[in-house]
Structures are given as C-alpha cells and as structure tokens.
Image (cartoon, grey):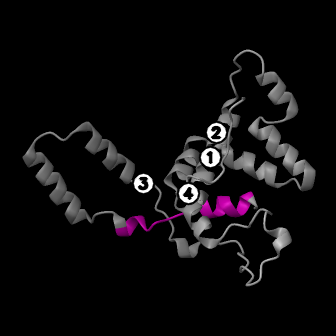
C-alpha cells in the first residue's frame, strides 16, 4: 500500500467538522448557560479546546482515494491466504481516525519518514521499513541485552502502525495483530 496515498488521505481528512461544530449563536448560548451555572470543570474546557481545530478539515469526498479492485466472484483458492488489498471502508477508517491524525500532528517528522520509505521498491523497501521500525536482525540482537531505550522515531512509527491496524481491523479483536514484545 503506497504511503503517499494514505498520507494524502489522512492529511486532508474530514468528518465535516463544520457540520459537527455548533454555530456561533449556539456557542454564545452555551457560554451564557455555563456562566450562569457557575465555573466549568477543567475537562469541559479542555474538550472545547480539542474540538476547536485551527485547520478546517476537507470533506472526505474531496480526497484522492486509491484504486480499490473489486473482489472476484470466484476467488482463487491458491491465493486464499495471501495478503488482501485494503477495501474502501478500511481506507475511510484510516482517513477518519483521530488517533492517526493526533500522531501525525505530534510527530511531524513521521510524514517525511514514510515518504522516504515509500521511495524504495522491493527488498530495499522492506529493509527500510524494518530499519525504521527497529526490527532488523541487529536491532533485535541489540534489544536482547539490558533495557534499551528506543529512538523517538521508532516509537512514533510503531504507534502509527498500531493506530492504522486498529483502524483497519474495525473492532475485530480476534484477528492477529502487531506484537512488539521481545519475548
């Protein structure tokens, strides 16, 4: 799956924030009611700050979605266990994931790191991805010793991989997933 397509999808995602956000009149009424009710709780103000997004989100229909091939009516039994391409609902789950958006905002170098990995092809790409995730043979041997602190980029990319996995899985807890434990 090309990372550029996923990044384009994620960077302009929207669940129509303008449709979800209250109007100015409603905000004024909420503020008036809160001031009449007394001091608001800190969690309410924090939630309000999180909702007020400085960058307006684009509608999902304006994004460049990758090609999704239709499933065959007669699937090849020899390809039954092969990895399957993502389907449109899975792309939508990635595009609307607030956890992925949060990770990309917190770690701005993730985008450049994914683009650098995406430039490689074949075995070079696999090795670049393994190196970025800290799962090459030398990385694993180094981690077998005393507690080793992983670089921030590795931790951020692993968190992004887990967030994408959660979005793609769609609540199926029985499916196999990523396991970063050294056991």
Q: Which residue is mark 2?
A: 156
Is residue 176 depicted above or below 46 in this figure? below
Residue 38, horizontal then vertical, whole percent: 10, 41
- Which of discs 4 and 1 lies nearer the camera? The answer is 4
N-terminal label among 3 and 1? 3
Question: Mark 3 falls on what kind of element?
Answer: loop
Which residue is most to the bottom? 73
Q: Which residue is at 78% across, 21% downward? A: 144
Cα distance, mark 3 to mark 2? Answer: 22 Å
Residue 12 colored in magenta in the image: yes
Residue 131 colored in magenta in the image: no
Pick the residue in front: 134 or 20: 134
N-terminal label among 4 and 1? 1
Give the magenta-colored segment's residue range: 3-19
Question: Mark 4 falls on what kind of element?
Answer: loop
Q: Residues within 10 Å of mark 2 (few under 14, many from 20)?
A: some
Residue 32, horizontal then vertical, whole percent: 12, 53
Cα distance, mark 4 to mark 1? Answer: 14 Å
N-terminal label among 1 and 2? 2
Q: Which mark is residue 62?
A: none
Q: Which residue is mark 4?
A: 172
Cα distance, mark 1 to mark 2? Answer: 10 Å
Q: Is residue 30 left or right of residue 123?
A: left
Residue 97, horizontal then vertical, whole percent: 52, 57
Cα distance, mark 2 to mark 4? Answer: 24 Å
Q: Which residue is mark 1?
A: 162
Question: Mark 1 falls on what kind of element?
Answer: helix
Report the magenta stretch's main SS.
Answer: helix
Residue 70, horizontal then vertical, whole percent: 71, 80
């Amino acid at each position: 799956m090309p990372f550029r397509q996923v990044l384009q999808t994620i960077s302009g995602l929207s669940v129509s924030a303008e449709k979800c956000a209250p109007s100015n009149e409603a905000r004024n009424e909420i503020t008036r009611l809160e001031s009449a009710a007394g001091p608001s709780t800190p969690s309410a103000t924090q939630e309000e700050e999180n909702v007020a997004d400085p960058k307006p989100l684009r509608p999902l229909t304006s994004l460049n979605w990758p090609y999704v091939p239709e499933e065959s009516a007669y699937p090849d039994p020899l390809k039954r266990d092969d990895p399957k391409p993502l389907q449109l609902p899975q792309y939508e789950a990635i595009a609307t994931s607030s956890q992925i958006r949060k990770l990309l905002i917190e770690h701005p170098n993730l985008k450049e790191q994914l683009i650098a990995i995406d430039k490689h092809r074949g075995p070079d790409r696999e090795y670049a991805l393994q190196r970025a995730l800290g799962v090459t043979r030398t990385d694993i041997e180094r981690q077998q010793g005393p507690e080793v602190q992983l670089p921030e980029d590795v931790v951020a990319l692993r968190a992004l991989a887990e967030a994408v996995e959660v979005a793609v899985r769609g609540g199926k807890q029985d499916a196999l997933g990523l396991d970063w434990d050294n056991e």
